[in-house]
Image (tube, rainbow, N blue to C red):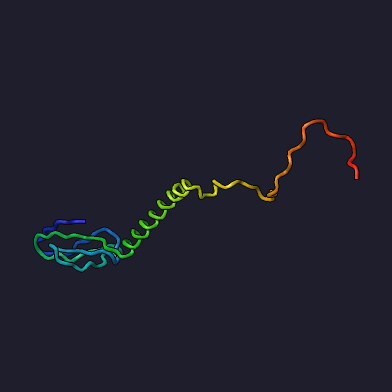
Amino acid sequence: MTVDVTSPEGGYLVLSEAHYPGWRATIDGEPADVQRANVMFQGVVVPAGHHTIVFELASATLRAGIAISVMAAAVVIFLMFAPARTAAHGSTAASRPFRTAGASSHPVPAPRSGAASSEAPTR
């Protein structure tokens, strides 16, 4: 955020942005001390005259959050395309025969065609 200020006597510029340790300020390109103002805002002491004040958020936690988000997005993209690549080689579970739980690995003979016999089996 950039602010142009003209003050004949100097003063204190209060930015209505929540005070957070990652904020930096420069006045005409020179570092300025960002102070807590009005309990929760931030401000800088401005000398007399015309000045350009730049506020920047340079938070280490913000950079870490961005890095983690980028890595997580890369993993998701990789996982989205990894199954498609292995499926082309026939190594996925979809290429194996499906068997339900409790199913025997031995084939069950098909019933014989024709009339069913009403005789009792002999021993």
Which image quadrant: the C terminus?
Answer: top right
Give the residue at x 31% y 65%. Answer: 60
Residue sitting at the far front: 123
How many marks the image carries: the answer is 0
The percent position of residue 106, horizontal first and vertical second, equals: 70, 48
Up-down relation of residue 39 to residue 91 (above or below): below
Give the residue at x 83% y 33%. Answer: 116
Residue sitting at the far top: 114
Which image quadrant: the N terminus?
Answer: bottom left
82 sits left or right of 16 in the view: right
**Towards the viewer: 54 or 35:** 54
6 sits left or right of 105 in the view: left
The percent position of residue 80, horizontal first and vertical second, equals: 43, 49
**Towards the viewer: 11 or 89:** 89
Up-down relation of residue 81 to residue 49 (above or below): above
The percent position of residue 55, horizontal first and vertical second, equals: 21, 60
84 sits left or right of 44 in the view: right
The percent position of residue 63, horizontal first and vertical second, equals: 31, 61
Give the residue at x 20% y 64%. Answer: 25
**Towards the viewer: 85 or 81:** 85
61 sits left or right of 44 in the view: right
Give the residue at x 14% y 66%. Answer: 30
- Which image quadrant for residue 114? top right
